Image (spheres, rainbow, N blue to C red):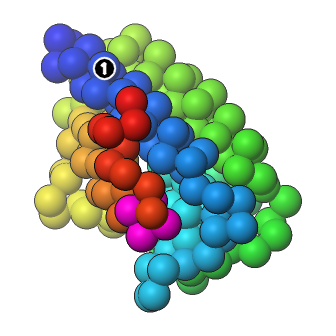
Amino acid sequence: MDQWKNMATLFDLMRKMAAEMAESIPEEEFDVPRGDANSPKWILGHLALGMDFGLMLIGSAPPTIESMMPKYGPGSAGGAVGDDGRTRADLLEHLRTAGDELKKKVLAADPAIFAEKQPTPFLAEELPTVGDLLAHVFTTHIALHMGQLSQIRRESGFPSWYQTT
């Protein structure tokens, strides 16, 4: 379980960084895609939905997963989201609270769950177990989308996140 404690530390750091990056993007640019990419709103909503996905993997799917999947899930249209009733503050709160709940449940989980076959077709070959897919949610998934937020910030004239902390 020590590896999960280490990943939980990284998970907290990356959620903090992603939130700070998303908060720094001007409101008028928050739902504006860059080229063929997704908007910062979509990225933040997608990361928030990722917390629900992780909770689902650990056996605790929240009701928000169904309502968020069409706008923010894999295979969604992406780009600009539009008015879906969720503000930046709502998505940031979702990322924080659902992420905190996910971390708590993962750290308290029976280790046997991590060896179970993951129940989705999503990256099933590359990430065959619940533990593999949860580790992705905790680390590489957030990191990938943080890179997108970082690039959007740079295109908006902001310095590197590390230069502002």
State yes or no: residue 2 in magenta: no
Q: Position of residue 41 (x, y in %)?
A: 62, 62
Image: 78 above or below 11: below
User: Dividing the picture into quarters, in which one does residue 135 lie?
Assistant: top left
x 32%, y 39%: residue: 163
- Residue 92 seen in the figure: yes
What amino acid does circle 1 point to?
A: Thr
> Compared to 1, does 118 lie above or below?
below
Q: What residue do we see at 53% from left, 40% from top?
A: 19
Image location (x, y in percent) of residue 139: 27, 40
The answer to whether one can see residue 145 in this image is: no
Looking at the rendered image, the quarter that the N terminus falls into is top left
Residue behind mark 1: 9
Which of 115 and 149 lies nearest the eye of the viewer?
Answer: 149
Quarter holding the C terminus is: top left
Please report the residue visible at 16 percent of the width from the left and 63 percent of the height from the top.
125
**Residue 76 vertical position relative to residue 16 in the rendered view, above or below:** below
Magenta stretch, main secondary structure class: helix
Label 1: which secondary element: helix
Instruction: Report if residue 154 lies within the magenta region.
Output: yes
**Relative horizontal placement of residue 147, taking residue 90 as reference (left or right):** left
Magenta span: 152-156
Query: Residue pushed farthest bottom?
Result: 36
What's the residue at 53%, 23% (across, down)? 100
